[in-house]
Image: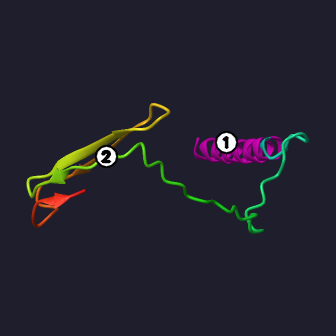
């Protein structure tokens, strides 16, 4: 009986080992139409120029108790700066 359990354990271990090798072999194939990603070579830098939109501005005074200043951009995007309580030492214009 002990030999039977040992044989079954070895066979199970062998089956699991072989199935892992087979899964790894089929799973590592790469589709030929998918481009490879190069994580080693540095990318081409972008030259970005920041241009402020003076028509879309927001300001306010935030107290020591916290507060927020909101803005809606020309494209409809909404931005909110939330300042938590006790983040500022005094009333601060933003």
Is 88 in the magenta? Answer: no
Residue beneath disc 1: 12
The colour mode here is rainbow
Residue 24, how many percent across, how many down?
77, 46
Helix, strand or loop at label 2? It is: loop
Q: Earlier in the sequence, mark 1 or mark 2?
A: 1
| Residue with the most extreme top position | 76
Of 29 and 76, which appears nearest the observer? Answer: 76
| Residue with the most extreme right position | 32
Is the C-beta separation of discs 1 and 2 under 8 Å?
Answer: no
Residue 23, how many percent across, how many down?
76, 41
- Callout 2: few (<14), some (14-19), or many (20+) C-alpha neighbours within 10 Å? few
Gap between marks 1 and 2 measured at Cα: 69 Å
Residue beneath disc 2: 58
- Callout 1: few (<14), some (14-19), or many (20+) C-alpha neighbours within 10 Å? few
Is 18 in the magenta? Answer: yes
| Residue with the most extreme front position | 55
- Residue at coordinates 69% horizontally, 61% vertically from top-left? 46
- Residue at coordinates 67% horizontally, 42% vertically from top-left? 12
Helix, strand or loop at label 1? It is: helix
Number of labels in the image equals: 2
Q: Quadrant of residue 78?
A: top left
Q: Which residues are magenta?
A: 1-26
> In the image, 57: left or right of 20?
left
């Amino acid at each position: 009986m002990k030999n039977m359990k040992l044989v079954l354990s070895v066979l199970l271990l062998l089956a699991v080992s072989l199935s892992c090798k087979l899964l790894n072999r089929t799973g590592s194939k790469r589709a030929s139409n998918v481009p490879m990603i190069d994580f080693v070579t540095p990318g081409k830098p972008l030259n970005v120029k920041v241009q402020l939109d003076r028509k879309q501005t927001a300001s306010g005074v935030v107290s020591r108790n916290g507060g927020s200043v909101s803005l809606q951009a020309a494209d409809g995007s909404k931005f909110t700066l939330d300042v938590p309580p006790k983040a500022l030492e005094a009333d601060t214009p933003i």
